[in-house]
Amino acid sequence: MRLLLRFASFVALMAAVLAGTVDSIQSVAASEPVLTPLAEGIGLLGPDALNWVQSLQRTDAGPAIWLTVLHWIFMQPAFAVMLVVALVLWMAGYRKKPAAGRFAA
């Protein structure tokens, strides 16, 4: 299980680096900061991904607080959201070292 969590963390980190790189290239080209929202970044993956994002944002998808939080997350920069996801997955897959030491029984 830890291996899967660490691998998912690695994939999320690579997605964050890719999104940050694209944003930095676009910022240099435009001579102003350009930050791609998460919803737009997911929408670039294809029409199925865009339909999935839009289905989550419908009013009948759940309580109003869930929709508000989801909308807020989708409007944040893609690289920042993916960095947070990578950190949470890494923390979930982290193995704490034993307090007694390496050679304790």
Image (cartoon, grey):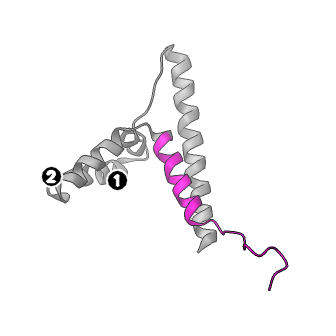
Q: Quadrant of the C terminus?
A: bottom right
Q: Is residue 65 magenta?
A: no
The image quadrant that residue 18 belongs to is top right
| Drawn side of residue 98 relative to residue 91, left or right | right
Instruction: In the rendered structure, find residue 28 and report the number of the disc placed on it.
Output: none
The magenta span reads: 80-105
Whole-percent x and y of residue 72?
A: 31, 42
> In this picture, is 22 found above or below 74?
above
Indicate which disc, 2 or 1, sits on the residue closer to the N terminus: 1
Q: Is residue 98 magenta?
A: yes
Q: Secondary structure at mark 1?
A: helix
Q: Residue at x 34, y 53 (%)?
A: 48
- Amino acid on which disc 1 is placed: Asp
- Amino acid on which disc 2 is placed: Thr
Q: Please identify, in this view, whether the residue under mark 2 or under mark 1 is nearer the observer.
A: 2
- From the image, tell me which residue sits under label 1: 48
Q: Residue furthest front?
A: 100
